[in-house]
């Protein structure tokens, strides 16, 4: 049976290696896991060395090279999920199912584990069950879930409302109120012509919304001016930065705008192929998005001879598989080619040598949607709002301690304080802008503004009130980076793991100023020596909390002198338990007794 | 015709267009610390030992092209300090027991640590569990010492045309895998005469039965520090 299923999948993808991400996902969805035999069959079919296929399968969190149970429950583990009680819920489910987190049950039925932020922070605690998003978990839902699993109830029979993902938008501006119907922007673009459109785009000063802020016009132009037979447009929908979910809103409520932005980019740079790299956590969106693509093809907005203008372009959706690093554009392109998502050397710009060596334009979802506004209204109109160096509006995903978590659209230049007031945040201690890799702002910085000149924002704004522990927050994200480091370069691969250990030591009360110095040293090393942006920003949150919330660290330190994280007496606790002894002879002298 | 030059720690280094800083330095007999770089292969840029500074920016000498009149800082206390930390990270990441390792004296990691005056591992050890693979009749794989430089991966792919090795996993769980369904080297087409069998800078890929043909104390880096100019190899 399994070989027929696999053959059908391989045939559907013409046994092409660059489709490996999709082939592996579909094989796993059909067969439950990726067995050594499955990997051999796949490798054989696509004509790749087996070791390359295994390398890819082993890189991504959502691919399993060992069985993980008929039900795989993954609790979203952003700090905001934890603030909403996700850890207690996970423990409750494990207890109910007699499970240890990360282990498969004896009968092979179920495994429960944590996963990086699933982008549902405004409706958490969230989880993925067999990679389907579930929101608003409660104790009652968990109990019911345990029952459903024990009764082997198929996922389709689970309560529908569990899978409901709401679009909670509290402020709309020019983008979300675009008022366009599909085709409007593309027709406007074609009416302007390629050169004029590019000029308008440059005039608009539309900058990349993913965080880096590279001018889109410049990217398009450099792609267009590189001689090549083929060019590629990629939409980066790998919204993995913890606390970010604004692209989910665009993809859910305005998918036409995103696809149209891609088509406009393709028209301008003369590309024939397009990809949406959609994060694996948004698997539930796939069928709807495919339907929109089909509708656009029928309407002559995609495919051959678009709008009778003689240009061809089509879009393919490729899923990520649980790797934050794939938000980095060169890692994303590697992943699109079926490889592990390791960022490339910066020898070549992607607009010169990208996907399969072709000039490739990689834009964020929000950037592409904004390109439609420029096509329709022009660059001058676009620049009317925002600040001198940041034109237009920004979608901000607000989560954490506030009354109205959701998406807010603001013109650039809005102050953090304004956002806090609008979302109903009270007693705010700190704000984390741009997710785990971003900036931690303290109270005296709330008048700072969201813009490329001041506080750049990739889309996340997490609010922490005065009851939250900033050391715990930083510790949480230090583990996030250790988990998500791709492992290519030494400083990030080992350094992020060392940082996580140091943060654990501090949180456990065994830290001293020595360890603080170590963290600063690691910050300097990772910032300057890392291969890519993941490593160079991985210590921001540690650095910011150390410099702005030092008391949170200080109160955990018991000693001003160095203390080893290894405690001899504690190491004997297992031996004491085994021998049933707890007398003074079973303890080392000069150390604390429990 | 006068050749283009750049400055490396105050010395003029000639280069030909297209050469990296590392290649030009090597040709001029100057040592820039490195682990994942090898003169026979293109720059990889993963170990980060070859960090150099030019105009205040940190660059990787093994991939950064040499440019006319650039001023490159190499063996400064600041950069060597960074390199020492990177070495310490590598030493605690794997299981490195130099006194009992048959690569001792020929090991690039060990020799580089001597060169940079690394005295302790400094960080807590990770003690990963990495079972050895002794299945192949000619060669032993001791993964405990792997530093993820991917030289064997590149040699097997580019020179041997075999693709015996690859890295899999992610982050600190990254590990070397071999090209067989069983995961054993025996079941691959690897041979002791492959280039990949020669290229490991540490003691992962070891030929059986010849480990101590040359006694410790008389080996390459026992004789001369790794920074000494050499005709062949690194």
Image (cartoon, coloured by chain):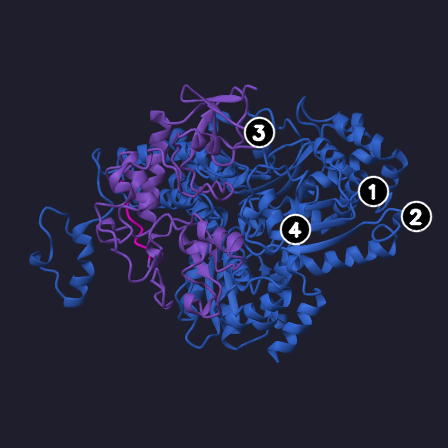
- Determine whether the residue tagged by mark 4 lies in a helix, strand or loop: strand
- Any idea which chain is the blue one in this picture? A
* Mark 1, residue position: A180
- The quarter holding residue A526 reads top left
Q: Disc 2 vs disc 1: which is toward the camera? A: 2
Mark toward the start of the polypeptide (4 vs 1): 1
Image location (x, y in percent) of residue A385: 72, 26
Image location (x, y in percent) of residue A35: 52, 70
Instruction: Kindly report the distance in space between the C-alpha atoms of the residues bearing marks 4 and 3.
Output: 38 Å
Q: Answer few, some or many: residues within 10 Å of disc 1's Cα (few below 14, many 20 plus, some between 14 and 19).
A: some
Q: Is residue A147 magenta?
A: no
Closer to the camera, A59 or A285? A59
Task: Give the extent of the magenta segment.
Answer: B121-128
Instruction: Kindly report the distance in space between the C-alpha atoms of the residues bearing marks 4 and 1.
Output: 24 Å
> Circle 1 marks a residue in which chain?
A
Closer to the camera, A147 or A301? A301
Labelled disc at residue B17: 3
* Mark 2, residue position: A308
Colour of chain B, in one word, is purple
Who's the residue at 58% across and 43% down the image? Answer: A328
Q: In this view, does A40 lie above or below A213?
A: below
* Mark 4, residue position: A277
- The quarter holding residue A163 reads bottom right
Q: How many numbered callouts? A: 4
The answer to whether tags 4 and 1 share a subunit is yes
Instruction: Kindly report the distance in space between the C-alpha atoms of the residues bearing marks 2 and 1.
Output: 21 Å
């Amino acid at each position: 049976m399994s070989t027929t299923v696999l053959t059908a999948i391989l045939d559907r993808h013409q046994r092409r290696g660059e489709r490996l991400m999709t082939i592996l996902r579909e094989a796993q969805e059909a067969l439950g896991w990726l067995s050594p035999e499955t990997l051999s069959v796949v490798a054989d079919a696509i004509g790749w060395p087996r070791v390359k296929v295994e390398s890819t399968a082993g890189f991504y969190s959502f691919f399993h090279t060992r069985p993980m149970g008929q039900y795989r429950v993954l609790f979203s583990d952003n700090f905001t999920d934890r603030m909403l009680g996700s850890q207690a819920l996970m423990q409750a489910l494990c207890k109910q199912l007699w499970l240890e987190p990360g282990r498969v049950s004896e009968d092979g039925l179920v495994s429960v584990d944590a996963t990086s932020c699933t982008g549902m922070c405004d409706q958490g605690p969230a989880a993925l069950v067999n990679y389907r998003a579930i929101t608003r978990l409660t104790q009652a839902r968990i109990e019911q879930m345990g029952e459903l699993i024990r009764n082997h109830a198929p996922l389709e029979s689970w309560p529908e409302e569990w899978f409901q993902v709401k679009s909670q938008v509290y402020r709309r501006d020019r983008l979300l109120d675009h008022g366009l119907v599909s085709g409007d922007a593309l027709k406007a673009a074609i009416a302007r012509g390629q050169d004029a459109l590019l000029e308008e785009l440059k005039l608009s000063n539309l900058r990349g919304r993913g965080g880096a802020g590279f001018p889109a016009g410049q990217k398009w132009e450099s792609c267009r001016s590189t001689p090549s037979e083929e060019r590629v447009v990629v939409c980066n929908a790998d919204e993995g930065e913890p606390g970010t979910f604004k692209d989910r809103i665009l993809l859910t409520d305005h998918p036409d705008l995103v696809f149209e932005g891609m088509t406009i980019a393709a028209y301008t740079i003369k590309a024939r192929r397009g990809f949406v790299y959609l994060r694996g956590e948004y698997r539930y969106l796939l069928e709807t998005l495919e339907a929109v693509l089909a509708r656009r093809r029928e309407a002559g907005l995609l495919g051959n001879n678009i709008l009778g203008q003689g240009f061809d372009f089509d879009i393919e959706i490729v899923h990520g598989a649980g790797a934050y690093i794939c938000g980095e554009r060169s890692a994303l392109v590697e992943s699109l080619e079926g490889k592990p998502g390791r960022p490339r050397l910066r020898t070549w710009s992607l607009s010169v040598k990208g996907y399969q060596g072709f000039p490739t334009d990689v834009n964020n979802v929000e950037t592409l949607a904004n390109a439609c506004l420029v096509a329709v209204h022009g660059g001058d109109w676009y620049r009317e709002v925002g600040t001198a160096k940041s034109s237009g509006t920004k979608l901000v995903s607000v989560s954490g301690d506030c009354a109205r978590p959701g998406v807010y659209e603001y013109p650039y230049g809005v102050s953090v304080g304004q956002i806090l007031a609008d979302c109903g945040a009270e007693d705010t201690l700190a704000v984390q802008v741009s997710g785990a890799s971003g900036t931690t702002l303290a109270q005296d910085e709330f008048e700072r503004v969201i813009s490329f000149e001041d506080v750049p924002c990739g889309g996340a704004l997490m609010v922490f009130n005065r009851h939250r522990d900033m050391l715990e927050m930083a510790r949480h994200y230090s583990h996030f980076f250790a988990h998500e480091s791709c492992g290519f370069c030494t400083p990030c691969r080992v350094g992020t793991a060392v940082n996580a250990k140091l943060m654990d030591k501090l949180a456990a009360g065994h830290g001293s100023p020595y360890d603080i110095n170590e963290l600063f040293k690691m910050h300097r090393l990772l910032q300057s020596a890392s291969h890519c942006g993941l490593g160079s920003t991985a210590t921001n949150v540690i650095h910011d909390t150390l410099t702005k919330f030092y008391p949170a660290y200080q109160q955990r330190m018991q000693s001003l002198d160095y203390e080893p994280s290894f405690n001899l007496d504690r190491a004997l606790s297992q031996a004491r338990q085994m021998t049933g002894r707890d007398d003074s002879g079973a303890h080392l002298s000069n150390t604390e007794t429990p | 015709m006068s050749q283009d030059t750049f400055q490396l720690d105050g010395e003029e280094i000639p280069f030909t267009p297209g050469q990296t800083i590392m290649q030009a330095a090597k040709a001029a007999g100057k040592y820039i610390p490195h682990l994942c770089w090898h003169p026979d292969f293109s720059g990889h840029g993963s170990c980060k030992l070859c960090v150099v500074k030019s105009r205040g920016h940190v660059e990787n000498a093994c991939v950064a092209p040499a440019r006319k009149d650039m001023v490159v800082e190499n063996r400064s206390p600041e950069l060597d300090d960074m390199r020492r930390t990177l070495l310490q990270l590598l030493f605690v990441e794997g299981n490195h027991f130099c006194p009992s390792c048959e690569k001792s004296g020929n090991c690039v990691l060990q020799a580089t640590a001597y060169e940079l005056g690394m005295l302790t591992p400094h960080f807590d050890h990770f003690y990963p569990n990495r079972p050895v693979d002794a299945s192949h009749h000619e060669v032993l794989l001791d993964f405990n010492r792997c530093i993820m430089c991917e030289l064997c991966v590149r040699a097997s792919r580019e020179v041997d045309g075999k693709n015996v090795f690859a890295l899999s996993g992610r982050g600190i769980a990254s590990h070397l895998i071999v090209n067989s369904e069983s995961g054993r080297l025996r079941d691959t087409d690897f041979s002791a005469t492959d280039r990949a069998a020669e290229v490991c800078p540490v003691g992962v890929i070891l030929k059986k039965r010849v480990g101590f043909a040359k006694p410790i104390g008389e080996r390459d880096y026992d004789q001369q520090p790794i920074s000494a100019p050499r005709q062949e190899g690194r």
